[in-house]
Amino acid sequence: MNYTLKNLSQSLLEISLIVSAEELEKFVPETVEELSKEIKIRGFRPSKAPYEVLKAQIGEMKICEYAAEKALWESYGEILAKENINAIGAPSFNIQKIAPHNPVEVKIIVPLFPKIAGLADWKKIKVPAKKTTISDDEVSKTLSEIQKMQTKENIINCESKKEDKIVVDMDMILDGVPVEGGQAKNHAIYLNEPYYIPGLNEQLLGLKRGDTKDFKLPFPKEHYQKSLAGKEVDFTIKVNDVFELVLPEINDEFAKKLGQKNLGELKNLIKKNLEAEAEMKDRERQEMAILDELVKNSQFDDIPEILINREAEKMIAEYKYEIAKYGLAFEDYLVSIKKSINDLKLDFAAKAVERIKASLVVNEIAEQEKIKTNDKEIMAEIERQFNLYKDDPSAQEEIRKPEYQNYIRTFLRNRKVIDFLREKCVR
């Protein structure tokens, strides 16, 4: 391994690295074994295909690229340790030269930890703990939700009532044009629960299997799709089924079906679970309050633009996940709010800076208080992750990667720092 270092700015370092052909060759057997697990090759069991057969299947260059990725990450880790480079976030690998059986040349752009000009004194931070108490009403509400989950549904051939569930085919039309996402087959609607379009439930009352109905309803003015917000939409409904919902009686027999001896024991279990959930939420509140105080009262050098962009991209990925949970296509959502990905990045920039500052504060306290994670803790967490994703080969492949293991190391250390601060600052 041959490399040179060059400071591009106060917050960026360039590593020019050459990995020799001999060093690269060390990773070829491991690469071949892993690739032959993923790629089905006729006549060979998974991971048993030899190099020449795999080369014929996917090409020698592809094997070289995978092996180079492993070699570069290992070399990068060794350079960080040897040069004591305080990197933050993932580096950018810009490969200059790569070919089978030849040295790999790469320039690695490494974002460096901005320096904290002045860390706030965490010893002066005092965050009050809240006493978590669960009322009988909260237990009863949760018990009712569990009761609903145990509801039996019986098909009935009569007019729907407010307590029923109705299954319909639904079409929405605006100005003669079908509403995007407004066509639904076998769409279930609980008539005793609020629907996102006010008035729809009332229109469905009194209908029975086989009925059809046309009507108009205005969309809510605050609807996320601006093209629909406040607009009057034509609905066509065809009823497929009506179900009577039969709620089980809440008694000792109900509790026994849920694995408890009696109703009193079930209520006690619910109360304990609610208390644990409330305590967890209060811990999260305490941690956020401590970090907010530390960030607000610390002084930071300039935050590199590359870090802000990466943090904003991470926030967008989290946002995509939340949008998907509601069954919405992210691209459609962007159109509805008339924004692009770059617009969202700008919107998230300020929050991204705050999150970066919080990570810098945590890292600084870890350094000052000598809070670290050991290999035993890291391996235990990796093993836990393997067991968690034992039926997901792609997830296990991610867990094996050095960068993911570096992430685990940082995550566990940060968790220790947060626990340390909460123990010292919460009163």
Image (cartoon, helix red, strand yellow):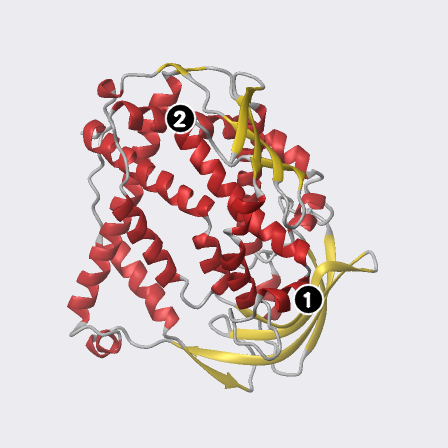
Q: Is residue 318 visible?
A: no
Say which label, 1 or 2, has the lower sequence index. 1
Secondary structure under tag 1 reads helix
Circle 1 packing at 10 Å, graded few (<14), some (14-19), many (20+), is: few
Question: Badge 2 is on which residue?
Answer: 84
Toward the viewer: 290 or 183? 290
Going 51% across and 62% down the picture, which residue do you hit?
A: 34
Residue 150: x, y in percent? 36, 74
Q: Residue furthest right?
A: 176
Toward the viewer: 306 or 254? 306
Q: Looking at the rendered structure, which numbered label has been put on residue 56?
A: 1
Residue 224: x, y in percent? 64, 46
Secondary structure under tag 2 reads loop
In the image, residue 38 sits, relative to residue 412, either above or below, namely below
Q: Residue furthest bottom?
A: 157
- Single out the mark in the foreground, 1 or 2: 1
Circle count: 2
In the displayed structure image, the side of residue 41 where residue 180 appears, left or right = right
